[in-house]
Amino acid sequence: MRIVPFIISAAVTAGLVVALNTPLSVGKTKTPRLGYFLSPQQGFWQNAEPENQSFDANIVTDGLQDKVEVLMDERLVPHIYANNDNDAYYTQGFLHAKFRLWQMEFQTYVAAGRLSEIVGPDRISTDRFFRRLGMLEGAEATMKKMANNPALQAAVASYAAGVNAYIKSLKPEQIPFEYKLLDYKPEAWTPIKTYLFLMFMSYDLTGRGTTTDLQMTNSKNYFGYEDFNKLYTNVQDSLDPIIPKGTVYEAASVIAKAPASLDSLYFAKTASVAPSGPEAPNKSNGSNNWAIAGSKTKSGKPILASDPHLGLNLPSLWYEVQITTPTHSTYGASFPGSPAVIIGFNDSIAWGVTNAGRDVLDYYDIKFKDSTMQEYWFNGAWQKSVIKEERIKIKGQPDSIDRVAITALGPVMYDKSYNANGSDGKYLAVRWTAQDGSSGLQTFYELNRAKNFDDYLSAINHWTCPGQNFAFASVSGDIAIKQQGSFVARWDRQGDFIMPGQDSSYLWQGMIPSSENPMIKNPERGFVSSANQMSTDSTYPYYLGAANAFPLYRGIVINKKLNAMSGITPQDVQALQTNNDNIFAEMAIPAMLKYIDESKLDANDKKYVGYLRNWNLRNDINEVGASVFRSIWDSLEVAVWADEFKNAKLPLQWPDESTLLEQMLRDSVILFQDNISTPNIKETMFDALTVAIKKATPYLQQMEKEGTLAWGAFKDTRVNHLLKIPALSRLHLPIGGGVHIINATTNNHGPSWRMVVHLVDGIEAYGVYPGGQSGNPGSKYYDTFIDSWAAGKYYRILFLSKEAAKQNSQFKWRITFTHA
Amino acid sequence: MKFIVATLLHAFLAFTIGLYSQFPWWLFIATSAVVSFFIAQAPAKSFFAGFIGLAALWAGLATGKDIANAHLLSSKVAQILPLGGSYVVLILVTALVGGLLGGFAALTGAYLRSNSTK
């Protein structure tokens, strides 16, 4: 009888199947289902794209009105030639999905607060944060607004149909690599996902207030308003605003009246809260753009440059595309997840955007009757709140329900169940312009088709959130820049801190009319530019928001250089975009040297001070002076501020670098230069600098020994995969630049798309982004552009008619879409 | 001869059923059991025919994909799993997983036959 061995071997087989078909826990992470993942016919091997892959295809689909032809160039950029606009967006959706499906879906999971569905319980706090912030409500409000706009609504619907046509065509083994790794499957795409993605961009560019408003409140409570106002000053001596100083503004048509209780209820000590939720959007989320008039260019035609600075990720946020239909022909960087071109050009105009940095998010301190949050006190009566139940699905666990109270002042972010350290049982509602939805997609839709300045202006006037500086140049010779968005008309310091929420006196009193937003067209100096600095000087009649939202130095150096340049070529503009001059160091080093007391330094200290003196002030990869400067400056800030900050129990925002530098430049008494930990000694800046240098020296010696003192190695730039898996990321990239530098590349943040457009007839354009057109880590097109990007090289963009493209040897493949 | 025929059949049928990717990846255990049920061999021989058939199939398919891809993806996956970044080790692990399952499925088929024939 061999029943026993039969049972044993059957059990072993079954056991193996189960073990190899179950994700196993390794530390905090889970393995994929190993058998499935390794199966050559179903698992990751299927994603290993042949090096000589042909992208030729004929796709038969019933979603189109007409035939569409796509010519793919050697960089895998699709050039879509369609006979009508909806077919073009259908094709764009299909191609986004074909090359970037996992990423575009993943981003919308994050935006919708559904990350736990994919990655498990670790990210519940992030999911609750985004749901409480009102991401889904904002996306739904956007969708409602779209009903007024049938052409755009049809474009978004066609785009979704294209994405779904691709998803439907996928065989199970063809799903992207990351689905196999995390073990889930793509779901159908819907227009709401496009709007969720745009909400996420709003969050990325205006969401810092969710953290900074709390930190600023903590700082104000800790230091008192008077010192706060010096440490986090709204005065920037060195400011070179987007709209040149001296421009005359008309009086404000909306006057925001500050409440009478300001001193007692707002500037005084109030509720303090430590933020929780996800990491705040990066402070360096900014950008450069400029447009140069023909008077300053060699050709006599304008040149436009745009480089948005965002987190550097693989797959990239951007995807290059050309869309050509009988109504328009446009090229540029698009968002996988959205139809149309976002930053680019057409045959008549070019446009680029930078973040405006204006404050469009505030917290209100709400008084609820009890912890059920059903009634809150407002304008002298108990008001009913709406309780929303958020069901959060969690991978490998039962669903979790989050109860969110919604008040007239916004949804409640922090309460007793979503707790924040130190919130003393306070309830904080969050009000954000993005919650109202946005017709922003209309802006890009119209810019793609714009012929001239008037079209540009009417296109961007649809724009509400996130506030942006739209630079513009046209073949006909105009240049312009406008800061556009739906901005709150604020009284001074309104919304910089948590506001009282028991009556309407602290509510937003009105929005600034679009016609009063800062703008210039064809200025005498022959260029317009922006680099996230304050858009105007203090004569502009509205409060722009706390100055620490506005980086100061890139704007100064860009304007200085553009002022000095003439006979400019596109190559000069490329060199400017990748310029590594450190204007901050140029201003800071003389101010630092003034306070160095050589008698207190030993030979080692002096060696590094020597490096500082001999540095050429450029953050090129081989410069050691750049690393020495950064180390000593950081130590100096610690020497000046840390003693005052160390007793704070709640997180405070560190003062801006400009706060210390401008005081040093002013030769005024420097705030907090005395070290309060040494009550018997009155320290000065000389002592602070000695301490800073002595602190930096051993650290610099260590790096010099390890060979990492050169700036490139010190900074160690990387482009992370969205899941932060090192094997799928590109590490240790040889690229200079940094904070305050035009080439704003830091450790994992920087120019995410560099574009230079020369507005000659037929358009001469250059572009590069740190990624590749394919999102598949198994494709050689996954990271193709990264080395060029790091080296500061550009690709000449092919912007051709279908007939010309067919003759061009740089086009390699052809995808045709035909109606079933 | 029987052994070779069995091994080839294991590989061929597993490949064929694997083309139907809407079914679970492990469905080849059925074909492996069937092959060793009908081709009577000693249990050890049955096991090795199943093992070698599947290991060779998985190694072969993986290697084909890997060469065409110039080891691009396998080198990354071999860091994630982690196998020291070696695509060779990754292919061997792939072969082992397929082989073990194929072997035990075949062994089960062989014992089933000896049960039903006695």
Image (cartoon, rainbow, N blue to C red):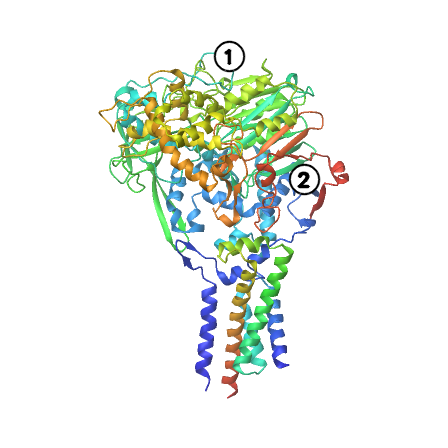
Image location (x, y in percent) of residue A395: 42, 53
Q: Residue furthest front?
A: A603
Amino acid type of the residue tagged 2 in the rendering? Ile
* Secondary structure beneath label 2: strand
Dividing the picture into quadrants, the one containing residue A436 is top left
Dividing the picture into quadrants, the one containing residue B60 is bottom right
Say whether residue A143 is visible.
no
Amino acid type of the residue tagged 1 in the rendering? Thr
Residue identifier under label 2: A80
Residue identifier under label 1: A247
Say which mark, if any, is on residue A480.
none
Image location (x, y in percent) of residue A405: 33, 38
Q: Quadrant of the N terminus of chain A?
A: bottom left
Dividing the picture into quadrants, the one containing residue A289 is top right
Image location (x, y in percent) of residue A473: 62, 23
Decide which of tag 2 and tag 1 comes sooner along the chain: 2
Q: In this rendering, would A658 be left or right of B88?
A: left
Closer-to-camera residue (A527/A716): A716
Say whether residue A264 is visible.
yes
